[in-house]
Amino acid sequence: MGNVVSSVLSIGFEAAKNLLFEKAKYILELEAHLEALEKVKPDLEDAKVALKGKLEMNFRNGLGRDERCKVWISKVEAIQPKVTKLLEDSTAEIERLSMCGYCSSNFFLTYCYGRDVLETLKEVQSLLSSKPSGEVASTGPPPGIEERATEPTVGLEKMLETTWSHLMEKDVGILGLYGMGGVGKSTLLEKINEKLVEKKDEFEVVIFVWVSRDLQVEKIQNEIGERLGIYDIWEKVKLKDIGIPFPSQANGSKVVFTTRSKVVCGRMRSHHVLEVKKLDEENAWELFRRNFRGNNTLSDPEILKLARQLCEKCGGLPLALNVIGETMAYKTSVPEWQCAIDDLDSNAGGFPEVEDEILKILKFSYDDLKDERVKQCFQYCALFPQDAGIDKDVLVEYWISEGIIDEGGDRKRTINEGHKIIGDLVRACLLMTVDTSEKVKMHDVLRQMALWVASSFGEKEENFIVKTCAGLKDMPKVTDWKAVRRMSLGRNEIRDISISPDCPNLTTLLLTRSGTLANISGEFFLSMPKLVILDLSTNINLAKLPEEVSKLVSLRHLDLSRTCLENLPEGLGKLTQLRYFALRGVRTRPSLSVISSLVNIEMLLLHDTTFVSRELIDDIKLMKNLKGLGVSINDVVVLKRLLSIPRLASCIQHITLERVISKDGPLQFETAMASLRSIEIQGGTISDIMEHTRYGGRSTSAISFQNLSVVKISRVNGMQDLSWLVFAPNVISIHVMWSSRELQEIISREKVSGILNEGSSIVPFRKLREIQLRFFMELKSIYWERLELPSLERVFIMMCPKLKKLPFSKERAYYFDLRAHNEEWFERLEWEDEAIED
């Protein structure tokens, strides 16, 4: 019995010893396995390329295809990214080992990594030994639909369903899919191919073609000799030139293509165009989390929290989620994760995988911008905070002041060119529109790409210093101030700036929206000879500006809006290059001597500030280059003086009237029609802002507030209607409250019927997005008949008891936010389409 037990124990011990030795090999022989994997990696690639070449030759000779070759190639392409990743992580993993390779500081993680290396090495060796020859005995045409190996997707299901639905419509022959780089367009196309495999009977042949940026028709023709779906088009492809009949119901052919430019969709004469958008928060996290299957990295609550932060910084971009997720899969310490977040915040180019696998891919869209000015404009957008809406008008003014755009001194043409460039960047998917048409936004990952490009691809990181929303309490540490060209430090907690940096090349300095900034020393501005833009707006505790600002001799753009400045430095008058001066929302009256010295000003924004005087109007009159003006007025005499000077009146873009009493008839705003963008009237007595005779006659249709977008009126007596609003076809927002008791109509049919005839080009409220009407006890009508209102998003009605009908259908009301002061009023409403039930 003892011998039996002894034998069993001996056998058990031997088995355990062998098992432990086998497992220990993962660590003990890790370096040898890595060396072997490094050696076979190029062999695998060479074998794949050679086999693909053999298959290409077979195809061109009319031979069939060996399915084993396809399977082998798909296995190779599936394992190659894993090989690359394991080798990239090798340095960090070797460093994890200690004591000459015999003891690891984290045995389990090193064990997992070593196991993956050995198993992958064996798989690669197996693939190399089992590579098919590529020889085929049979002849015949290639299969009609070629299956392509794809991985499961996240968040594309709804988009795939929508795309497939449009593709199957009989009248859709060409379908364009556009979106920013890395958003998943090609993956979507591959999923469409999978669905086509399921419907082999409906299409004889499906061909995929990759189109490079340097379009080569002959190359595409050769590829079409093999397979069709077109990936990644950068410019118009003439289908006839590459041998594809134009799709029609008669021939039954269809073309689906992807592109990063919406413009290409139009030039390709697409029957339907769909935008592939980034993932929502839930799907983005699911995709990011998939990179951690098989390990317990995210089981640490602190790392899980940081992982969610890192995922959020990917901005829903699948390419970024996958690359960064793969990179972090085996990072198990909190400092490593925090470092990764800091790297992405400060300089994504310092994150090797991000630079190689994300930024360089996204840069193709940047490189495709033909105009160097447009590239500079794109880089400039990176100065704004992450996820912040960028005001289009402000952005264009920055570009003008920096000298990036200049249409030969013609300011109107230059502004139009600026807005065209914004449109070009949106259509190239390098900027995004936001809820309001006045703003755009830059995706976080594209913002990192722009900063990477601006820093000469990471080599000159201090070219652009962008530390917005960074919680800074002091000015950032800069190694070489002489290298800094643009600096943006908005939305921080800096209280005092008392440094004296030497900044000979600084051109833009944005120090905005800091609720704590109270002091800037004069020394700070002494060595900035090239500074052209200084924006200190929305620093609500900044009460004083040092006299040394007057030494910024190159300054062209100065914004001091929404500060609490008590006085302006007298030396501001020395800034003879100043073209743009904003002093909105500042309760200090600008010095006459300062204003009178700024003779080259083109934009002067003083609205929401202390009311201008007649003397100040006369000084402004001397500004021969003035093109835009914003003012606040509380005296009808000053207002009439301003409107009586045609050149000044035509410059008014923003005007606020407070307690203005006009006893001798309507105001005459006709001279200010061309440029006016916003008007706010608070209190006072005003019957109308236009002569009644202007509402009739043929000439009226040519008189229009074309640029007016915002109208606010409160507590104004004397108005019976607001019929002049029909001359504002592009108005976006109307807020009217507590105004005249006589007001019974917003638009008077009697007044405007003469101009809104059948042949009129005036379409009221076509861009209106928001209307608020409050406390109008006698109001009975907004408009006498139904309006389409295609842009309307919000309607708020409060205490308008006699208003029984709204100028849109109940069905149309389902598409926007309609609110009222009580349900009883809402229930009594009459609709244009009473047949439609709630």
Image (cartoon, rainbow, N blue to C red):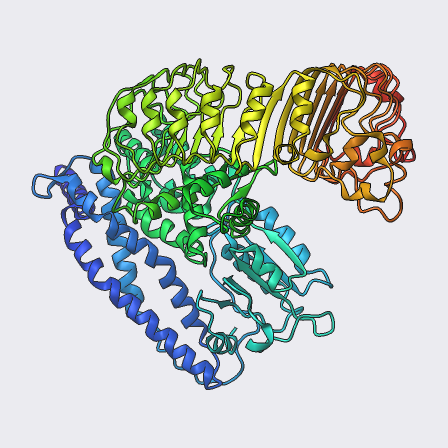
- The quadrant the C terminus occupies is top right
**Quick one: 484 or 30, which is closer to the camera?**
484
Q: Quadrant of residue 52?
A: bottom left
Residue 54 lies, with reference to residue 771, above or below; the image says: below
**Quick one: 291 or 822, which is closer to the camera?**
822
* Number of marks in picture: 0
Instruction: Report x, y in % for residue 235.
Output: 52, 64
As drawn, is 418 to the left or to the right of 250?
left
- The quadrant the N terminus occupies is top left
Q: Residue at x 54, y 49 (%)?
A: 417
Residue 680 lies, with reference to residue 628, above or below; the image says: above
Instruction: Report x, y in % for residue 376.
Output: 41, 48
Is residue 385 visible in the rendered image? The answer is no
Instruction: Report x, y in % for residue 391.
Output: 53, 35
Is residue 492 visible in the rendered image? The answer is yes
Residue 737 lies, with reference to residue 42, above or below; the image says: above
As drawn, is 223 to the left or to the right of 728?
left
Q: Residue at x 34, y 30 (%)?
A: 303
Q: Quadrant of residue 794?
A: top right
Instruction: Report x, y in % for residue 438.
Output: 59, 37
